[in-house]
Image: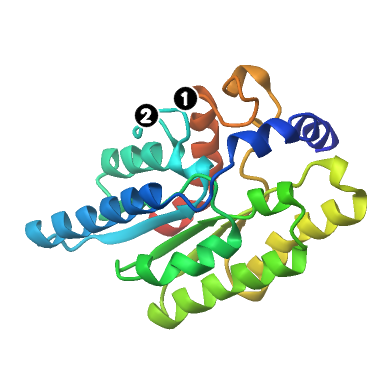
Amino acid sequence: MKKIIKRYGALCLLFLFACNGSENNSAVSEVESKVKVTSEVTDDKKEKKKTILFFGDSLSAGYGVNEDECFPGLIGQRVDSLGLAYNVVNAGLSGETTAGGAARIEWILKQPIDIFILELGGNDGLRGIKPESSYENLQSIIKKTKAKYPEVKIIIAGMMAPPNMGEDFTTKFRNIFPRIAKENDAELIPFLLEDVGGIPALNQPDGIHPTPEGHKIVADNVWSILKKMVL
């Protein structure tokens, strides 16, 4: 874990550059369009499938890779190959913060959700946003989701802040995710980028966003938790 944190910290400035531009209206519209289309296709076919929804930032959105190469896309392919009665919806938005997520969650909730995978917080950590504010935003997202869909199952994707933010900050930030999971009876992926973060061969030239091979490992990290809910 210490080795991962060290590698992660060395790339923090590149991460800040790569994830800039959270409030991109065209990107938001594109995400909303994908969610709407997915819902319409399901209605047209009258499928009685449940929905797995990824709600995150550029990692979920698949920055720099094809839609079918990012980990939500890979999860969708795995679900289909197993013949499971689930549709996978990717509502990731590059540059998204927890505050941005809290602001757009109500639109996303127009889509029925059975399993909600929350992958937000990484950009907060890089920008030095107070961990308590990130915690409150994540709680707001979960509260609204549970209010709309009381039976929803939730998975929290844990992230880490780079060590140059200081030990006190990084510790508080890292602890947000297990705290959120415990308080909301949610499943936890301790660190989404386990075995990928800080490894040059598994990341794009920006040093932080996974390559297609990196996304395969991230998909395995997600699947190790998700499979208990769908199999």
Q: Earlier in the sequence, mark 1 or mark 2?
A: 2
Q: Is 134 displayed left or right of 226 in the figure?
A: right
Crowding at mark 1 (Cα within 10 Å: few <14, some 14-19, many 20+): many
| Residue drawn at (59%, 64%) of the image | 99
* Position of residue 103 measured from the top left corner of the image (x, y, whole percent): 49, 68
Question: Which of the pair 100/200 is nearer the observer?
Answer: 100
Crowding at mark 2 (Cα within 10 Å: few <14, some 14-19, many 20+): few
Which residue corresponds to mark 2? 66
Residue farthest toward the right in the current orientation of the protein: 167
Q: Is 45 displayed left or right of 25 in the figure?
A: left
Taking 186 as reference, is 56 above or below it?
above
Taking 40 as reference, is 81 above or below it?
above
Q: Is label 1 or label 2 in front?
A: 2
**Residue 187 seen in render:** no
Q: Do the residues under discs 1 and 2 have CB atoms within 8 angstroms?
A: yes
* Position of residue 11 measured from the top left corner of the image (x, y, whole percent): 74, 30
Taking 75 as reference, is 231 above or below it?
below
Numbered disc 2: secondary structure: loop
* Position of residue 94 measured from the top left corner of the image (x, y, whole percent): 49, 44
Quadrant where the N terminus is found in the figure: top right
Q: Amino acid at mark 2?
A: Asn
Which residue corresponds to mark 1? 212
| Residue drawn at (57%, 22%) of the image | 204
**Residue 81 seen in render:** yes
Numbered disc 1: secondary structure: helix
Question: Which of the pair 230/195 is nearer the observer?
Answer: 195
